[in-house]
Amino acid sequence: MEKMHSVCLAFSAAAFLAVAPPVMAQGNDLSVGRKMLVEDNPGELWIDQGKDLFYQKRGPKNVSLEQCDFGMGPGKLEGAAARLPRYFADTDRVEDLESRLLTCMTSLQGFERNALIKQAIGRPRTKGSDMEALALFVTSKSNGMKVNVTLSHQKEYDAYKAGEYIFYRRSGQTDFGCVQCHGEPDKRIRLQDLLHMTNKAGAQEVASTWPAYRGAHYIVRTMQWRLNDCVWQMRLPDLKYGTDYSIALTTFLNHRGNDAVMNVPGFKR
Amino acid sequence: MKKTWLKWSVYAAVGLIAAGCASYPDRATTQQLAEKMVFDAFSASPEHMKRLVQDRSQQICSKIGDEKLTQAEAAEVVKLARASIKYPASGKLVGDWKTGDKLAHNGAGDRIRNGKVENRKENGALCQNCHALAPGEINVGNVGPSLTGYGKQRGNSEAIAKYTYEKIYNAWVYFPCSNMPRLGATGHLTPEQITHMVAFMIDPQSPINK
């Protein structure tokens, strides 16, 4: 019942956005509607879904994810997501939240990596994927805490610098890198606000609001989804799930977004 | 006793050096690492993988952070841009503004999902995404400058038509490394399509000049 209520709210809120007269003033008038939505964020529903998935015994090995180490020790979730991406000795790799979940779901639970990846990004208007719900649940355990992505291992420094390089790297028939849309304040693609990510506040918003409820899709989305959609618009080919490319970009943005207070699920158009 | 002290000092020194060694990679190392990441990150046919390969101008125009374009680099980009421009076979640079209007409001074309390029008759010109167009038009972006009244301000002389054609074909002739895609040079639009965009920009009947 409560679920229905929130879904209804989401619908009416979305309808409000659709019929509200567009406001052209330079500032953030459009964000007023979005702020209203954040207060009743339907994405909250996915936290419980993710919690159930996390503690259930699942996969060929029939174990929960309670022994998964997100960097603070096995099973320690409080504040862990706020420190990701980071270097993990067991995989000898810098991992973000989603690639770390993949690691645990394959090594602990015995799921097949490719099968997980195939389902990792849910279809709109469904209950979404297990990955999306799990990512939100784990991140929600950092709510209220500050983003604190540190660079100490060489591979963390490498990821940061590579992420920065990729952010500015132009290619393809649109000549786009990330910075073409996200390098200046108060910019929009049509009516959609673009975050100013070369600015501290913009990077902080990136680092502290994913996973987020995506209004137009009626489900919770992750950072990996966001990057996929960006490269699609840039006319690049299909971005694979959980690659060093995504992890490097996320390391670059999240490190710059340090000290933001985690608040998930975010709310996106 | 002395030996133990010495042993621990050596351990400490090794530890400090190991820890101290972790630092930002230099530019060349960064490039090597990141380029490998780029080419490992996408699943695509060899044909589609070409979209990730930078041409010389894109390499120059991918300045990181506050790095500045040198004069020599800007000159090279302009020279390459100048050489890239092809004109329509007809020689006529001004097409049909109504066709241009439709294209200006079309943001689709050539996007890849699950290995397939979207099925469109032609690519959109993407203008609406970034530029204000007709007066009072609301659903327009602001990443690029407003084009409202473009032709009204500049007229529709042959010189303006040519400048506008070249600017759309390869913006980097006039503004090296600007955010504007080189729509003709990268093959996103055909020369024929660009003539319609020119008409949309400079024809007195076009909504942007009303």
Image (spheres, helix red, strand yellow):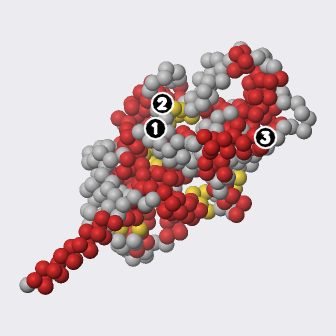
Where is residue A155, by image quadrant? bottom left
Mark identifier at residue A196: 1
Task: Say whether marks 1 and 2 touch (CB < 8 Å).
Answer: yes
User: What numbered label is drawn on residue B85?
Assistant: 3
Residue drawn 53% across the image and 32% down it: A188
Q: How far across and down, in percent of the image, does residue B84 sit? A: 77, 44
Q: Using the image, name the chain to which the residue with label 2 belongs.
A: A
Q: Which residue is mark 2?
A: A186
- Is A25 placed above or below A134 here? above
Within 10 Å of disc 1 (Cα), the crowding (few <14, some 14-19, many 20+) is: many
Q: Residue at x 26, y 48 (%)?
A: A145
- Please say if the residues under marks 3 and 2 sit with CB atoms less than 8 Å apart: no
Residue under disc 3 on the same chain as residue under disc 2: no
Badge 1 sits on which subunit? A
Q: Amino acid at mark 2?
A: Asp
Single out the mark in the foreground, 1 or 3: 3
